[in-house]
C-alpha cells in the first residue's frame, strides 16, 4: 500500500476519534453520562451525581472510594463497585423506600476517573488516559501522541489484570492494524490496562 494512502487511512481511522471528548479529563467527564445505565460498570475513582427528585438535600456528587463504596444521606455507606448505574439507582431507591416511598432516583457519571488506561514506553506523551465508553489500542496510542522513532512496533503488548486472576500479557499486531488491512485486530482496552511500547533493538 502506498505510504500516502496508508497515512490517510490511519488518520481517518484512529486520529479523528482522538478529537472526541476523550481529549481532556475535563471534557471526558461529560462523555460517560450518555452511556447506557445498564452497560456502564462503576469502578473506584468514578465520580457520580446522585439526585432524588424534589429532595434538595439528596442531590449529591460523590466519589467511589478505593474499597468500592459510596456514602449517601439517609442510607449511609453502600457498595457501588461492579454495579451498573441502573443497579445502583435501584439499590438507593430500595434503601430510601421506608423514608421516601416511590423516590425518583437518578444516577449519572460526573467523571469516569476509574475508567483509565496507561500508555508507557516509547510514545510521545506517556501517561494515564480516561477511557470514556470505548477505547482501542490505536486510539490510546494516538492519545499518547503516537510512537517515537525508537519504538518497537512488533513488541507492543497490553498488560491486563482481571479480579482474582494473574496478570496477562497480550501481544498487539501493530503492523497488521496500521496497514489498514486488519482493523478488526485493534484490541478494545479494559479499565486498568497498560499498553507497553518497548524500545526497538539496535541489532
Image: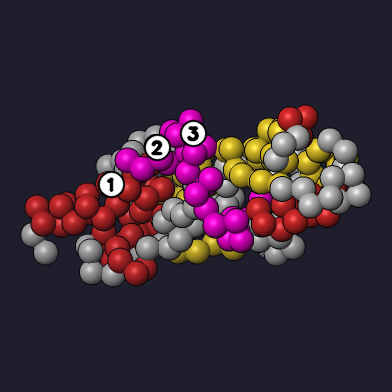
At x 30%, y 66%, the residue is: 183
How many marks do you count on the picture?
3
From the viewer's side, name the closer residue of 104 and 15.
104
From the viewer's side, name the closer residue of 18 and 158.
18
Residue 182: mark: none
Dot 2: what SS?
Answer: loop
Quadrant into which the N terminus falls: bottom left
Dot 3: what SS?
Answer: helix
In this picture, which residue range is highlighted in magenta? 19-43
Q: How far is disc 2 from disc 1 in space, using C-alphas?
A: 11 Å
* Mark 1 or mark 3, whichever is nearer to me: 3
Q: Is residue 120 at least partly visible in the picture?
A: no
Residue 45 among those drawn in magenta: no
At x 37%, y 63%, the residue is: 186
Q: Which residue is mark 3?
A: 25
Figure check: 151 above or below 72? below
Q: Position of residue 40 (x, y in %)?
A: 59, 55
Q: Which residue is mark 1?
A: 15
Residue 163 occupies quadrant? bottom right
Figure check: 161 above or below 18? below
Q: Is residue 149 left or right of residue 122?
A: left
Q: Is residue 32 left or right of residue 149?
A: right
At x 41%, y 55%, the residue is: 137
Q: Is residue 170 at least partly visible in the picture?
A: yes
Contact? badges 1 and 3 (CB < 8 Å): no
From the viewer's side, name the closer residue of 111 and 124.
111
The answer to which of marks 2 and 1 sits earlier in the sequence is 1
Figure check: 185 above or below 154? below
Q: Position of residue 107 (x, y in %)?
A: 66, 46
Amino acid at each position: 500500500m502506498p505510504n500516502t494512502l496508508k497515512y490517510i487511512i490511519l488518520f481517518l481511522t484512529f486520529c479523528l476519534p482522538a478529537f472526541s471528548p476523550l481529549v481532556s479529563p475535563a471534557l471526558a467527564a461529560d462523555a460517560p453520562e450518555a452511556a447506557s445505565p445498564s452497560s456502564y460498570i462503576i469502578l473506584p475513582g468514578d465520580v457520580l451525581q446522585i439526585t432524588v427528585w424534589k429532595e434538595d438535600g439528596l442531590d449529591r456528587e460523590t466519589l467511589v472510594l478505593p474499597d468500592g463504596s459510596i456514602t449517601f444521606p439517609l442510607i449511609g455507606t453502600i457498595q457501588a463497585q461492579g454495579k451498573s448505574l441502573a443497579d445502583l439507582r435501584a439499590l438507593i431507591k430500595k434503601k430510601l423506600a421506608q423514608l421516601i416511598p416511590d423516590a425518583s432516583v437518578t444516577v449519572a457519571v460526573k467523571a469516569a476517573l476509574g475508567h483509565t488506561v496507561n500508555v508507557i514506553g516509547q510514545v510521545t506523551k506517556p501517561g494515564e488516559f480516561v477511557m470514556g465508553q470505548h477505547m482501542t489500542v490505536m486510539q490510546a496510542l494516538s492519545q499518547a501522541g503516537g510512537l517515537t522513532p525508537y519504538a518497537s512496533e512488533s513488541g507492543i503488548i497490553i498488560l491486563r489484570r482481571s479480579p482474582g486472576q494473574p496478570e496477562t500479557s497480550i501481544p498487539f499486531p501493530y503492523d497488521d492494524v496500521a496497514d489498514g488491512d486488519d482493523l478488526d485486530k485493534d484490541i478494545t482496552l479494559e479499565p486498568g490496562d497498560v499498553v507497553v511500547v518497548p524500545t526497538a533493538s539496535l541489532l
